[in-house]
Image (cartoon, helix red, strand yellow):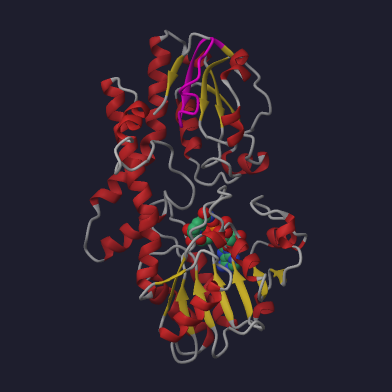
Amino acid sequence: MERDIRIGVIGLGYVGLPIALALAEKYEVTGFDINTAKVTSLKKNIDPSDEIETEAFLSKKISFTDDIAELAHCSVYVVAVPTPVDKHKVPNLKPLQLASESVGCILNEGDIVIYESTVYPGCTEEVCVPILEKASGLKYMEAFKVGYSPERINPGDKQHTLSQITKVVSGCDEESLDTIAELYGSIIEAGIHKASSIKVAEAAKIIENTQRDVNIALMNELAIIFDKLDINTHEVLEAAGTKWNFLKFYPGLVGGHCIGVDPYYLTYKAQQVGYDPEVILSGRRINDNTPQFIAKKIIRNLIKQNKNLTACNVLVKGVTFKENVTDIRNSKVYDLIKELQDFSLSVDVMDCKAKKDEVKKEYGLDLIDEPRAKYDVLVIAVAHDEYKGEGFGDWEKHLVAEPIIFDVRALYRNQNLDKKAIYLTL
Ligand SMILES: NC(=O)c1ccc[n+]([C@@H]2O[C@H](COP(=O)([O-])OP(=O)(O)OC[C@H]3O[C@@H](n4cnc5c(N)ncnc54)[C@H](O)[C@@H]3O)[C@@H](O)[C@H]2O)c1
């Protein structure tokens, strides 16, 4: 691998930025994003998503731009743009198509384009390649090559960092596969897995997240059943977990833009080829309905306490889509808040990680810094490390005499409460 190889990274978010910085340890990298404010911030060595420290930008061969023409000198392109679904849960390939068009416009003979965005099997060659061909006027396989290498990073996880996760790579032929494997192999310590085709690599990524989604859905369904049977789900899981082959999954809210979204890419493709995926879609439905289940359980208990719902105050701790991240996109905590508000409860929300302006913009909610009422209900919705360190004692004074506590991730299951509280978990 020539060390003077020049790489363009398209899309500088949770996936694109770490890969750009990792590649910039060895190669000259130009990062491109259509979000000018993000590019301005990155030029100052500040990651707007707070995932990467400023030190990681220093002494790297990297520059940032919002002008695609500045990537024209590159010979390898890595595309890491979003792959969301629309409101009907259908894949929205617009960002991927636009990014392919941008790359196509500057593509030269001999270049390689590597896609990292999560897609359904077949998408890279069926959707992206024709756009690259059209925009560049070059012929696929003859004048340029394409590869696919799915990303597996887990935002908020400081242990499984990019270089510590085995990277699956694929190429459109042996030569491109070897080149791509060598490129990633030079920055990934954990090693490379060469997939036999682009489709296999695409499918591998999509099933990793689908498997997690379905397993969590099973736990959420068990939580519904055990609620009816008046058994504590976590006690059941603890007991069952003593068997060597019992898989460790827990009930919870499945939000964000990966686990709750990627399965729809697979189900979309499955339906296109005439198969109706029953297990995956019912798992999705169960996970999407978990906020409503939590809200109803809270309401049922308030009614049992003869509370006037319109006079009840709720404090929700945590609004990000999962623990230890600032990312609030597609947070199911918001669905829970909406449901509680629909029952006329007054809901205050705090989060030690989320950014106030983003929460206001995305959900119209004003995060509070300190509790400002005596709360009838406390919901610990996200298991941020900061909340794990707290005990009940820290906020008991903000609760009414007989509060309802819904601890979504069962953080405080084994703690004693001074107050006479109704303690609920999934
Ligand atoms: N976030 C994760 O944990 C994670 C993990 C593995 C895989 N993925 C996948 O990686 C892909 C990217 O996800 P992400 O979390 O980094 O998204 P993100 O939203 O954090 O970042 C994407 C970036 O792409 C930019 N962008 C959008 N359209 C563009 C275009 N046409 N040209 C250039 N830039 C453009 C956006 O402005 C944004 O900065 C998705 O397919 C996602 O499913 C994400």
Q: Where does the N terminus fall, quadrant-wise?
A: bottom right
- Is 66 placed left or right of 297 in the picture? right
Q: Nearer the viewer, residue 149 or 350?
A: 149
Q: Residue at x 58, y 22 (%)?
A: 391
Q: Residue 35: x and y, percent?
A: 65, 61
Q: Which residues are magenta?
A: 400-418
Q: How many marks?
A: 0
The picture places residue 243, in percent across and down from the top left corner, at 29, 38
- Residue 355 vs 292, above or below: the answer is below
Which of 409/107 is in front?
409
Q: Work out whether 69 lies above or below 167.
A: below
State which quarter of the image contains the C terminus. Answer: top left
Indicate the quadrant where residue 207 lies. Answer: bottom left
Q: Is residue 109 magenta?
A: no
Horizontal side of 331 relative to 23 (left or right) equals: left
Q: Is residue 315 above or below residue 352?
A: above
Q: Is residue 107 visible?
A: yes
